[in-house]
């Protein structure tokens, strides 16, 4: 849904989580499930962009999900800023630097 996200996520970063997932020091089950929802056209979207970005960067094929409630989706629609249908997201690294996660 979002066009960009910050790398920092709490006390960790998206890239740190991706590396930990890749090397096995962090398991997908150690993180909360990613909340997803399906639009009227049948496309699945996420409400948890940083965790999805970490999973994508780690190269994982399967991730834990949970269907979001209609209320959760409605409260997050202000984040719907993607210009490319959700095919990629800009990860803001700081100091004006960024990278694209596909």
Image (cartoon, helix red, strand yellow):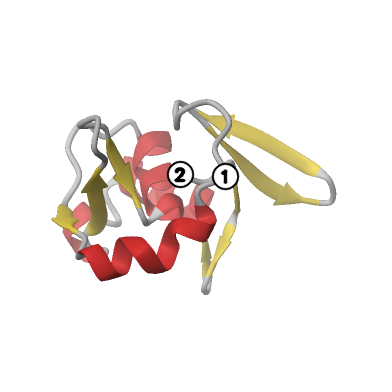
Q: Residue at x 43, y 51 (%)?
A: 49
Tell me how many marks there are: 2
- Assign a secondary structure to mark 2: loop
Vertical relation: 73 (above or below) 43: below
- Compared across the picture, whether 57 is left or right of 91 comes to left
Q: Badge 1: few (under 14), some or many (20 or more) residues near its Cα, within 10 Å?
A: few
Residue placed farthest to the front in the image?
40
Question: Which quadrant holds residue 40?
Answer: top left
Percent x, y for residue 70? 23, 63
Question: Which quadrant holds residue 26?
Answer: bottom left
Question: Which quadrant holds residue 76?
Answer: bottom left
Q: Nearer the viewer, residue 95 or 21?
A: 95
Among numbered discs 1 and 2, the one appearing first in the sequence: 2
Q: Nearer the viewer, residue 55 or 69?
A: 69
- Compared across the picture, whether 14 is left or right of 83 comes to left
Question: Do labels 1 and 2 touch, CB within 8 Å?
Answer: yes
- Assign a secondary structure to mark 1: loop
Q: Residue at x 16, y 51 (%)?
A: 64
Q: CA distance from mark 1 to mark 2?
A: 6 Å
Q: Nearer the viewer, residue 21 or 9?
A: 9
Vertical relation: 28 (above or below) 71: above
Q: Write down the residue under mark 1.
A: 81
Percent x, y for residue 33? 21, 60
Q: Nearer the viewer, residue 77 or 56?
A: 77
Q: Write down the residue under mark 2.
A: 1
Vertical relation: 67 (above or below) 82: below
Q: Badge 2: few (under 14), some or many (20 or more) residues near its Cα, within 10 Å?
A: many
Percent x, y for residue 17? 42, 54
Vertical relation: 57 (above or below) 50: above
Percent x, y for residue 94? 76, 53
Q: Residue at x 52, y 59 (%)?
A: 78
């Amino acid at each position: 849904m979002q066009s960009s996200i910050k790398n920092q996520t709490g006390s960790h970063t998206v890239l740190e989580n991706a590396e930990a997932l890749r090397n096995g020091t962090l398991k997908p089950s150690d993180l909360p499930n990613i909340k997803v929802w399906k639009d009227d056209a049948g496309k699945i979207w996420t409400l948890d962009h940083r965790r999805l970005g970490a999973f994508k960067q780690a190269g994982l094929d399967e991730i834990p999900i949970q269907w979001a409630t209609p209320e959760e989706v409605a409260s997050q629609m202000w984040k719907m800023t993607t210009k490319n249908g959700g095919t990629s997201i800009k990860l803001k690294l700081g100091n004006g630097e960024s990278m694209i996660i596909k």
